C-alpha cells in the first residue's frame, strides 16, 4: 500500500529554518507560542516578502473593533507617519522663514542706525524702522546719564532718579523682560500713552560706556509674552547700544 506523504501543519512550517532546531539538534515542540512567532518575524523581517499571499488572509484588531488586513493597517501607519513628517517639515520651514524675516529686519535696523550721524537722528531712525519693519507701536529709549543738552525730551535719566526704581529688577538681571509693564514702568517709558501699552519688552542696555533702557511696546496683549525667547532682543540691544555709544562719544 502506498503511503500518503505526511501532512505538515501550518504552525510547523517555521521549523524548516535552522533556528527551529535546538542546540542539541532536536526539533522544537510542535506548538509554537506567540512570543516565538514574534521573535522569528522580528529576526526575519523579509519573511512576508517571500509569502505575500499570507498577507491577504491575515487580519489584526482595529481600534474601532473591526478587523482590517495587515496591508491596510501598514498603509494606515505609513500614511500617519508621512503626515507627521510633513507637519514637522512644515514647522521647520516656518521657523526658517521666520528667522529669515528676523534677520532681514535686523539688517534694516543696522542700516538705519549706521545712517544716523547724530543722536537725534539715531533715535528718529530707530523709531521709524521699528514701526515700519517690526510693526512696533511704541518705542522708548532711556539713557542713564546726567542730562546733557539734547533736543529729545526724556532721552536721559539721571542715575539717581526715582524714575529708575520701577526697573530695578531688569537693570540688575541685564536680561530682557517681556509681558505687561507695570503702570509705573509704562508712565516712565511712554508718558501719556502708558495705558495704551498692553504688552512690551523692556531691554536693558548694559555696556561699559553706556547704561540705559530700550522698550518696545504693542497695543496687543500677546505680542510680547513672558515666554518669548531673548535671542533677537539681545541682538537688538547690542546693535542699538553700540551705535548710541559711538554717537554719544561724538557729542
Image (cartoon, rainbow, N blue to C red):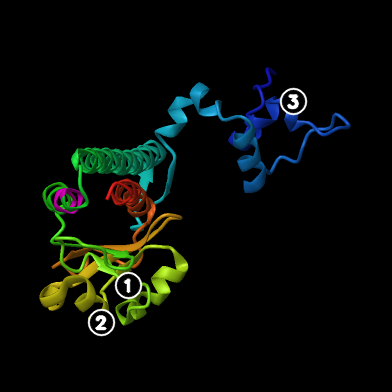
Residue 123 lies within the magenta run:
yes
| Percent position of residue 226, x then y | 34, 68
Q: Which mark is first along the chain, 3 or 1? A: 3
**Badge 1 density bin: few <14, some 14–19, many ≥20, Cα 10 Å:** some
Q: Secondary structure at mark 2?
A: helix
Q: Which residue is mark 2?
A: 184
User: 12 and 43: which one is in front?
Assistant: 43
Q: Report the residue at 70% width, 30% height from top.
A: 15
- The boundaries of the magenta stretch are 121-126
Q: Which mark is first along the chain, 3 or 2? A: 3
| Percent position of residue 130, x then y | 17, 51
Picture quadrant where residue 110 is located: top left
* Nearer the camera: disc 2 or disc 3: 2
* Nearer the camera: disc 1 or disc 3: 1
Q: Which residue is mark 3?
A: 18
Asked if residue 204 can be seen in this view, the reply is no
**Badge 3 density bin: few <14, some 14–19, many ≥20, Cα 10 Å:** few
| Percent position of residue 73, x then y | 38, 42
For this orientation, the residue located farthest to the top is: 2
Left or right: residue 36 versus residue 137 is right
Q: CA distance from mark 1 to mark 3?
A: 88 Å
Amino acid at each position: 500500500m502506498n503511503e500518503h506523504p505526511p501532512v505538515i501543519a501550518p504552525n510547523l512550517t517555521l521549523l524548516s529554518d535552522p533556528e527551529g532546531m535546538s542546540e542539541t539538534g532536536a526539533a522544537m515542540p510542535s506548538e509554537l507560542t506567540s512570543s516565538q512567532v514574534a521573535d522569528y518575524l522580528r529576526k526575519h523581517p523579509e519573511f512576508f516578502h517571500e509569502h505575500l499571499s499570507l498577507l491577504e488572509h491575515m487580519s489584526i484588531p482595529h481600534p474601532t473593533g473591526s478587523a482590517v488586513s495587515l496591508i491596510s493597517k501598514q498603509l494606515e501607519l505609513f500614511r500617519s507617519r508621512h503626515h507627521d513628517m510633513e507637519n514637522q517639515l512644515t514647522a521647520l520651514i516656518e521657523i526658517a522663514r521666520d528667522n529669515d524675516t528676523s534677520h532681514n529686519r535686523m539688517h534694516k535696523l543696522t542700516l538705519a542706525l549706521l545712517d544716523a550721524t547724530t543722536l537725534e537722528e539715531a533715535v528718529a531712525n530707530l523709531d521709524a524702522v521699528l514701526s515700519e519693519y517690526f510693526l512696533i507701536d511704541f518705542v522708548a529709549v532711556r539713557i542713564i546719564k546726567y542730562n546733557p543738552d539734547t533736543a529729545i525730551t526724556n532721552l536721559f535719566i539721571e542715575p539717581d532718579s526715582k524714575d529708575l526704581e520701577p526697573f530695578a529688577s531688569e537693570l540688575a538681571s541685564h536680561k530682557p523682560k517681556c509681558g505687561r509693564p507695570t503702570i509705573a514702568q509704562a508712565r516712565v517709558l511712554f508718558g501719556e500713552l502708558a495705558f495704551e501699552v498692553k504688552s512690551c519688552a523692556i531691554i536693558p542696555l548694559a555696556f561699559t560706556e553706556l547704561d540705559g533702557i530700550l522698550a518696545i511696546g504693542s497695543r496687543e496683549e500677546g505680542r510680547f509674552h513672558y515666554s518669548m525667547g531673548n535671542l533677537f532682543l539681545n541682538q537688538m540691544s547690542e546693535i542699538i547700544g553700540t551705535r548710541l555709544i559711538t554717537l554719544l562719544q561724538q557729542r
